Image (cartoon, helix red, strand yellow):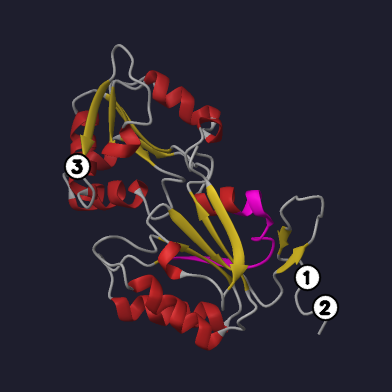
Amino acid sequence: MSTGPGWLRVVGLGPGDPRYLTAETLDVLAAATDLVGYGPYVARVPERAGLTRHASDNRVEVERAREALALAASGRAVAVVSGGDPGIFAMAAAVLEAIEAGPAAWRALDVAVLPGISAMQAASARLGAMLGHDFCAISLSDNLKPWATILSRLTAAAQADFVIAIYNPASRARPDRIHEAFALLRRLKAGATVTALARAVGRPDERILVTTLAAVDPGQVDMATLVLVGSSETRLIPRGGGLPDWVLTPRSYGAGR
């Protein structure tokens, strides 16, 4: 870590369990003078002497990034926090967008993005090995891209037989998008395709449901839920004894065809 007059680190807090924080991120949070992020994420970091917290609402990512960069430019040690991994649908892109459009001096700042544990990694690990073969991640949020583009990408992913991790699947402002997405996937993939809803992985209210594409209820999905739709190879390994089945997407493809 830099010992210079000011720096900025974009860090991920993982899916929710403090044990998912990397040692590198813990070091940054211990050294930072300022914490910048979406309110619920800032609230996950314990308060301590010498740490100033700058919490803001959702949908102001670039404004938040500008605030963080201005603080770093003034000599502060800044941690910008995201959930999961900061580079996956999170603040790393917003910080770089702000740098790109901002004062030339920001490009010389000591800025780094540190990796974190994403929701799809945590969910796949809890399930077993659902991301054991090729996969893709798609956000259903159409705040910054057209819904038609999202449907086009879902179509391509389904036709290519990827395991699909669906982020930002539903919100109060767009409760019907997940229904439309599942309707599309059901036209393109077998109804027996293994599908998992992983909500709040690592938190006290964690809930994981393994079902099929035909049987899944989109009404059970909210913004705290990660949706995983398997490939044609994804299958269950029964364990017995009341234990949940493992979910496996094998490393080979088409071996049994």
Residue located beneath label 2 in the image: 255
Which badge, 1 or 3, is on the more N-terminal residue? 3
Outermost residue to the bottom: 187
Question: Do the CB atoms of the residues marked 2 and 1 lie less than 8 Å apart?
Answer: yes
Q: Which residue is mark 1?
A: 252
Q: Outermost residue, front direction?
A: 242
Image spot of residue 178 (x, y percent)? 39, 71
Q: Is residue 193 above or below residue 201?
A: below
Image height check: is 97 above or below 158? above
Q: Quadrant of the N terminus?
A: top left
- Per the rendering, the mark at residue 182 is none
| Magenta region, residue range | 124-138
Residue, far top: 49
Looking at the rendered structure, the kind of residue marked 2 is Ala
Q: In the image, which is nearer the foreground, mark 3 or mark 2?
A: 2
Query: Residue 232 colored magenta?
Result: no
